[in-house]
Amino acid sequence: MKSIKLNDQAQIPALGFGTWQMRGDECVRAVLTALEVGYRHIDTADVYGNHKDVAKAIKESGLAREELFITTKIPWDLLRAPDVLENFNRYLDELDMSYVDLFLVHWPNKQIPILDTLGAMNQLKQEGKVKAVGVSNFTSHHLQDALTTGHKITLNQVELHPTFNQLELQVFCKARNITMTAYSPLGRGEDLAHPAILELAKKYGVSPAQVILNWIISRGIVAIPKSANPQRIEDNYKSVSWEMEKIDIEKVNNISQQPRILNRPNSEFDY
């Protein structure tokens, strides 16, 4: 599996498995299938309510903890330092782990100083409970505020897909050595039917989903598709087994853009 080096030297698998809106047996089966197919990067979050399900799947897989890369996130209303520390220990209990590889702020919150949040997260890193600290759903101005604290931001996980390609944000992040992860990489499925994607799928003899995921990874961005369908889980995994020509990467880059799909109150997205 191709990996990307974070700015703190940690390695993150370029293709991960998302678990949003998955709970219970469905989540356990999906994560277990993903691990059996070859995924080693699992993305979860407090608000998903599936930490215990992810833990169960990992246990059933028989894989060693050291073989995996686990990401979780703390929600926007629990970003005060005491809340970060208290809830993270709960996450470890739910995941049945002694550490996570990547800990993210799930959404920015202008009501809580980011300095306090990042300070607590880095305390957890110093204690060995977190390997890397990052954020999610941060625009350039959120990142600028966070960087003024002096704390290192390793990664920013954002909505990113062909019709919302985040090219400008990538330029900003790359200049500051911040890796990006793409959630909703298939645009909730809507981007799969775009004529340019279908054309490339035919050219390479792969699925439209593979075209999109390969395009994301070719840009040096981590992709975390989600699916409960075993065939789709396996098909998505195959997106790392071939290379897209640069001219075709540009073709996808040039697809007409649409508004973001996912919004949250108080996020102050700049459009």
Image: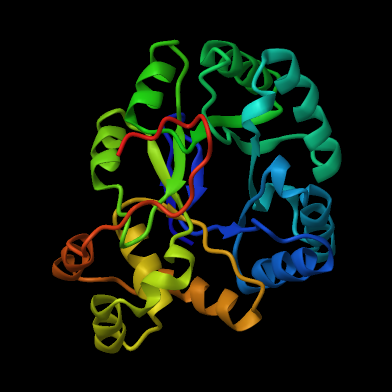
Residue drawn at the location 43% of the way across and 66% of the way down: 186
The residue lying toward the viewer, choosing from 213 and 114, is 114
When the figure is inspected, residue 173 is found, relative to residue 251, above or below; the finding is above
The residue lying toward the viewer, choosing from 5 and 162, is 162
Res. 162 image quadrant: bottom left
Residue drawn at the location 23% of the way across and 77% of the way down: 196
Quadrant containing the C terminus in the rendered view: top left
The residue lying toward the viewer, choosing from 256 and 246, is 256
Res. 193 image quadrant: bottom left
Tell how many labels.
0
| Residue 79 image position (x, y, % from top left) | 64, 22
| Residue 260 image position (x, y, % from top left) | 39, 51
98 left or right of 136? Answer: right
Residue drawn at the location 26% of the way across and 33% of the way down: 172
| Colouring scheme, one of rainbow, by chain, secondary structure, one colour | rainbow
255 left or right of 162? Answer: left
| Residue 23 image position (x, y, % from top left) | 78, 60
Direction front: furthest residue: 265
When the figure is inspected, residue 171 is found, relative to residue 36, above or below; the finding is above
When the figure is inspected, residue 86 is found, relative to residue 162, above or below; the finding is above
Direction left: furthest residue: 247
Residue drawn at the location 60% of the way across and 17% of the way down: 117
| Residue 246 image position (x, y, % from top left) | 17, 65
254 left or right of 144? Answer: left
Q: Is residue 236 visible?
A: yes
Q: Is residue 241 visible?
A: no
